[in-house]
C-alpha cells in the first residue's frame, strides 16, 4: 500500500478508472485510485451506457465515436470480454426539427459514423410499433452501441489493477492537501497519501471538494429518474434499437431480450441551474416518484404502440452532476498539480475513452491538450457555452416537483 504516489485519482467511477488506466499505460509509476464506497457505486453503476455519434456538435460526435470504438475494441486491447450491443440508434423527431437533425446526420457521417435520414417505412422496419404521423422525421445511425454499465466499470477496474493501479475502496478522501499553491496529496480516514498530482473525478461530490481549495465550479446536483419496462407478456413485440423520440421526451435502449431501459431527456427541462432538482446525493429517494412513473408509462405507450400492454419492471433514480450546458468540465486551473473532470450531466459513459486519454496526457505533460480546451471551466463566465443536442426541447416537458421527490 503506497503512502506516496505519483498521481492520486479520487473517484471510482468510469472516468476516474479510465484516467487511472491510461496513466499506467503512459508509464506513470505509482497510481492510486481512491473510492469512498465501491467501484461504480455512484452514477456509473446507474448509467444507460449508450454511445451514439448522431449529434450536430462535431467535437461531441467525435468523442462519442471514440468511445464506441473503444468499447468494441476493449476485449482485444485488455483481454477482458465485455458485452457490447450494437443495435443502432433511431432518432424520431418532429418535422420542425428536420434542419437540426439533418445537421446531426451530416456531422456524424463527416466524422466517420455513417447516419442517414430515412423514411417512415424504413423506420418501421427497424423498429416495430413506432407511432407514426405526418409531421415526423426519422434518422438512423447503425453503428451506435450500448454496454452494461456495471460490467464495463468492473472491467475497467480489473484492467487498471492488472496494469498496477492501486484501487482502494471504502477509502474516503477527507481533504485535498496543498502546500502554498501546489498540491501535496490527500488526507483519508486511513492516513495521508503524498502526491504531486491529484485528479478529482467524484461527480456531484467534486464541487465541494474543489471549493475547499478555493475553486468554484458550476456543477450542481440534479435528480434524474429512470425505469426498466417489460414487453407485453404475449411476446409479440420488443425494443430493437436505441431510440430517442423527441415527441415523448424519452430515450430508450434494449435490456436483455424482453426489457428496455427508459429515461427522460433531461435537456428538455434543464436549461440552467434554476431548472435542476437539487437533492442531497447521500440522502434522496432511490426510486422514481409514482406520478412521474405514470407519466413515463403513458408517454412510452405513445411512442411504441405495443407498450400499451407493457409494464414497469423496476425503477430507480440518481443524482447527476449537472453543468449549465450539460457538458463536462475538464480542467486544471487551480493549485498546481490539481486536475478535475466533473459535470458529465448523465453522459459520462459516452465520452469516457477520450476523457481518460486526454486527462492522463494532461497530468503527465502538465500542459492542457488543445483537444479539451472547449471544456474549460471559464467558458461559463465567458459566455462560450456549448449547444450540442440532436433535437429541440420537447414542447411539453414533464418536470419534477418538490412534492414528487421527497
Image (cartoon, rainbow, N blue to C red):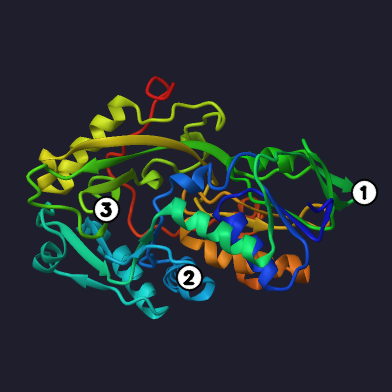
Q: Are circles 3 and 1 on residues that touch, CB within 8 Å?
A: no
| Helix, strand or loop status at disc 3 | loop
Residue 384 seen by the camera: no
In this rendering, position of residue 246 left or right of residue 75: left
| Helix, strand or loop status at disc 1 | loop
Residue 231, disc:
none
Residue marked by disc 2: 74
Q: Residue 243: x and y, percent? A: 26, 56
User: Tag 1: Cα neighbours inside 10 Å, few (<14), some, or many (≥20)?
Assistant: few
- In this rendering, the answer to whether 216 lies above or below 25 is above
Residue marked by disc 3: 256
Q: Residue 48: x and y, percent? A: 39, 51
In the image, 249 versus 312, the foreground residue is: 312
**Could you tell me how far apart the alpha carbons at marks 3 and 2 are, in whole angstroms?**
21 Å
- In this rendering, the answer to whether 394 lies above or below 223 is below
Q: Residue 333: x and y, percent? A: 75, 56
Given this view, does label 3 or label 1 mark the residue nearer the observer?
3
| Helix, strand or loop status at disc 2 | helix
**Could you tell me how far apart the alpha carbons at marks 3 and 1 are, in whole angstroms?**
53 Å
Of pointers 3 and 1, the one earlier in the residue sequence: 1
User: Tag 3: Cα neighbours inside 10 Å, few (<14), some, or many (≥20)?
Assistant: few
Amino acid at each position: 500500500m503506497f503512502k506516496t504516489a505519483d498521481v492520486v485519482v479520487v473517484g471510482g467511477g468510469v472516468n476516474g478508472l479510465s484516467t487511472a488506466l491510461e496513466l499506467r499505460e503512459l508509464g506513470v509509476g505509482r497510481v492510486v485510485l481512491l473510492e469512498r464506497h465501491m467501484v461504480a457505486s455512484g452514477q456509473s453503476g446507474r448509467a444507460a451506457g449508450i454511445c451514439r455519434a448522431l449529434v450536430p456538435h462535431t467535437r461531441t460526435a467525435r468523442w462519442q465515436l471514440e468511445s464506441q470504438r473503444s468499447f468494441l475494441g476493449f476485449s482485444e486491447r485488455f483481454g477482458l470480454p465485455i458485452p457490447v450491443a450494437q443495435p443502432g440508434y433511431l432518432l424520431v423527431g418532429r418535422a420542425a426539427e428536420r434542419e437540426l437533425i439533418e445537421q446531426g446526420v451530416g456531422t456524424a457521417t463527416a466524422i466517420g459514423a455513417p447516419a442517414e435520414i430515412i423514411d417512415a417505412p424504413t423506420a418501421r422496419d427497424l423498429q416495430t410499433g413506432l407511432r407514426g404521423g405526418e409531421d415526423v422525421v426519422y434518422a438512423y445511425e447503425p453503428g451506435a452501441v450500448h454496454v452494461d454499465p456495471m460490467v464495463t466499470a468492473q472491467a475497467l477496474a480489473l484492467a487498471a489493477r492488472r496494469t498496477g493501479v492501486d484501487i482502494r475502496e471504502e477509502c474516503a478522501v477527507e481533504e485535498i492537501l496543498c502546500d502554498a499553491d501546489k498540491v501535496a496529496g490527500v488526507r483519508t480516514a486511513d492516513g495521508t497519501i503524498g502526491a504531486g498530482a491529484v485528479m478529482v473525478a467524484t461527480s456531484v461530490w467534486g464541487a465541494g471538494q474543489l471549493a475547499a481549495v478555493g475553486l468554484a465550479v458550476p456543477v450542481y446536483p440534479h435528480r434524474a429518474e429512470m425505469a426498466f419496462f417489460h414487453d407485453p407478456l404475449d411476446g409479440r413485440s420488443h425494443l430493437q434499437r436505441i431510440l430517442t423520440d423527441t415527441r415523448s421526451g424519452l430515450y430508450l435502449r434494449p435490456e436483455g431480450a424482453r426489457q428496455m431501459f427508459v429515461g427522460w431527456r433531461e435537456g428538455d427541462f434543464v436549461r440552467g441551474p434554476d431548472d435542476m432538482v437539487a437533492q442531497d446525493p447521500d440522502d434522496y429517494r432511490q426510486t422514481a416518484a409514482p406520478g412521474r412513473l405514470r407519466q413515463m408509462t403513458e408517454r412510452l405507450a405513445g411512442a411504441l404502440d405495443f407498450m400499451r400492454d407493457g409494464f414497469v419492471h423496476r425503477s430507480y433514480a440518481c443524482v447527476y452532476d449537472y453543468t449549465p450546458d450539460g457538458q463536462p468540465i475538464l480542467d486544471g486551473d487551480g493549485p498546481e498539480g490539481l486536475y478535475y473532470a466533473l459535470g458529465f450531466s448523465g453522459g459520462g459513459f459516452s465520452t469516457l475513452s477520450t476523457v481518460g486519454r486526454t486527462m492522463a496526457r494532461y497530468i503527465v505533460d502538465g500542459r492542457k491538450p488543445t483537444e479539451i480546451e472547449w471544456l474549460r471551466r471559464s467558458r461559463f463566465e465567458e459566455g462560450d457555452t456549448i449547444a450540442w443536442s440532436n433535437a429541440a426541447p420537447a414542447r411539453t416537458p414533464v418536470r419534477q416537483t418538490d412534492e414528487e421527490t421527497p
